[in-house]
Image: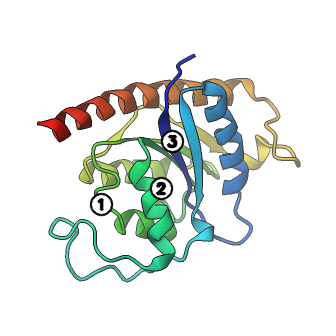
Amino acid sequence: MPHSSLRLAVIIGSVRDGRFGPVVAAWFAEQAQRHGGFEVDVIDLADVEIPLALPAVSPSIEPNPERPPSLAARTERLAVADAFVVITPDYNRSLPASLKAFIDWHYTQWDAKTIGFVGYSGASGGLLAIEHLRQIFNELNAHTVRNYVSFPRYPLFFDEEGSLREPEAPNAAAQAMLDQLHWWASALVAARDVAASA
């Protein structure tokens, strides 16, 4: 089991009433703690006011614009994170608007960092949202790891207390993804340190 002070931010992307994201995030955060390679920070977008109207100037020109006070603490938590895992459902074959707006309000915070995904939804298990997220984060110069975790027809996986009915396969998938995240996060931290000292 790896040991490291790498910081992992787990982002709950759905804010809708009755959402299932916190259940999935609680399970995944426990898996990340068990992995032993990360300090885990859970960021719930339902706790944040996220404006949809973005600054007039492109982030490529002004990468750190003045942000609403509601975002300030989360922006700092993103900045210090070394890796991210996004917990997302599919909404109309894509990601939630809340998650897209949160991503778009930030720019340098994703740069040269690694990202993994846990999807949950109906038949697709969040994979449609994950594929869109891969494209978005690639544009932001972030590295998305190959492995992911998916819960199609997610109510069948979890019991009424939020525990997995058959945890072996999902737990193994989570640990495999966390191993990839740890490898890439370690490499990218070292690369950023070299770039900063050049």
**Image quarter (top left, top right, bottom left or bottom right) of the C terminus:** top left
Q: Is residue 131 left or right of residue 119?
A: left
Residues packed near mark 3 inside 10 Å, few (<14), some (14 to 19) or many (20 plus): many
Q: Is residue 42 left or right of residue 137?
A: right
Taking 69 as reference, is 153 above or below it? above
Q: Earlier in the sequence, mark 1 or mark 2?
A: 2
Name the residue: 56% across, 71% down. 48
The picture quadrant where one finds residue 61 is bottom left
Residue of label 3: 8
Could you say whether the residue bearing mark 2 is in a helix, strand or loop?
helix
**Closest to the observer, 192 or 98:** 192
Residues packed near mark 1 inside 10 Å, few (<14), some (14 to 19) or many (20 plus): some
Q: Amino acid at mark 1?
A: Tyr
Name the residue: 28% across, 29% down. 190
Give the Cα distance between marks 1 and 2: 13 Å
Q: Is residue 132 left or right of residue 60?
A: right
Q: Amino acid at mark 3?
A: Leu
